[in-house]
Amino acid sequence: MKFGQVPVEEAVGALAAHSVRAGEMVVRKGTLITADIATRLKQEGVDTVIAARFEPGDIAEDEAAFQLAKILAGENIAVEKPFTGRSNLYAETAGVLIIDVDEIDRLNAVDETMTAATLPAYKPVVAGEMVGTIKIIPYAIPEILLQQGIESAGRSALQVAPYTRRTVGVVSTTLPGLKPSVIDKTLAVLGRRLEPTGARIVQDCRVPHEASALSRELASQAGGDAELLVIFGASAIADRRDVIPSAIEMAGGRVEHFGMPVDPGNLLLVGSIAGTPVIGAPGCARSPKENGFDWILHRLLADVPVTRADIMSLGVGGLLMEIVSRPQPRGGGESEGEE
């Protein structure tokens, strides 16, 4: 593509690179300059314009953006009709956004003329939400360059994993200093968290904060109606040998990982019993504010695997808020810390 300032009479057949105002006449950016437009501009005293002219082998910005967007769009992703060199991608269903970060990086590294921007990987999204955008910077790019971008991007780098787990069982442990109203509020907060996912709480059980009582309840619920179990401890998990992880193992389950590099949310546990995933919720999960619990909850509801390695990779970006002061994290009952 040729680009630059040319005499107005030589701009016929090219695109106006910038809007031009001359008297009562306005030639908008991107307008194809015809012989009539050039004549009228000349009459208004315009001698030169900055114009873009396609060359053989060039692909117009809209077509290039659309081709790249279609390549990147995977399952449950819709591609919008392109405009001004941009093609947007939208979620077709509620779920968790899955991104092949390496493919997006490779595309963006091909050439400055092609760009792809997305929401963060694993972000919960709703139907109709924009999840990415492809923008071609100039008015056209060489077809050979576009092909390099297509090859670098691969296919289906963006997709939405829909929420598939719809039923959640909750087990809350109790201690003398923990008021029932605290548990009630916790369940209400969880219910609101679940609303965008279409999931609901189907079991609400409360047992003493001791491993034997908790293990019996977990064993009875695992493999039942609840597709995901969430444990809210009266006291935060302090160690892998603490009440909640011990109860999971006593119930025949396993602890996949304890602790996560996300703050608030450090004291989260992920495990499973009889194939049912289990989350040992951190104290901050009682709050409606975003914390590490949200990240893991949404992934599991969308049946996105959460491994030890996945959790340990969350540190960059894992500082969700600055906490100037907080209660002692190993307190009990209502004084429980944010972890």
Image (cartoon, helix red, strand yellow):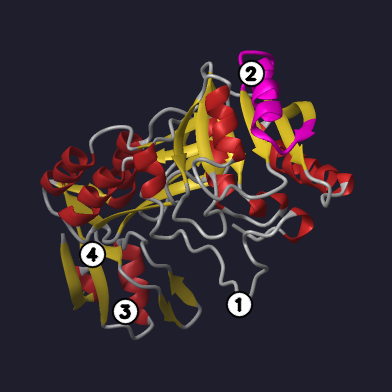
Amino acid on which the number 3 mark rests in the picture: Lys
Q: Nearer the viewer, mark 1 or mark 4?
A: 1
Q: Position of residue 86 (x, y in %)?
A: 39, 52
Mark earlier in primary sequence (1, 3): 3
Q: In which quadrant will I find the C terminus?
A: bottom right
* Badge 4: residue crowd in 10 Å (few <14, some 14–19, many ≥20): many
* In the image: residue 144, left or right of residue 328: left
Q: Position of residue 59 (x, y in %)?
A: 21, 47
Q: Give the CA distance from mark 1 to mark 2.
A: 40 Å
Amino acid on which the number 2 mark rests in the picture: Ala
Residue position marked by numbered label 4 in the rendering: 52
Q: Give the CA distance from mark 1 to mark 3.
A: 65 Å
Mark earlier in primary sequence (3, 2): 3
* In the image: residue 83, left or right of residue 331: left
Contact? badges 1 and 4 (CB < 8 Å): no
The residue shown at (71%, 27%) is 213
Residue position marked by numbered label 3 in the rendering: 42
Residue position marked by numbered label 1 in the rendering: 324
Contact? badges 4 and 3 (CB < 8 Å): no
Q: Is residue 296 visible?
A: yes
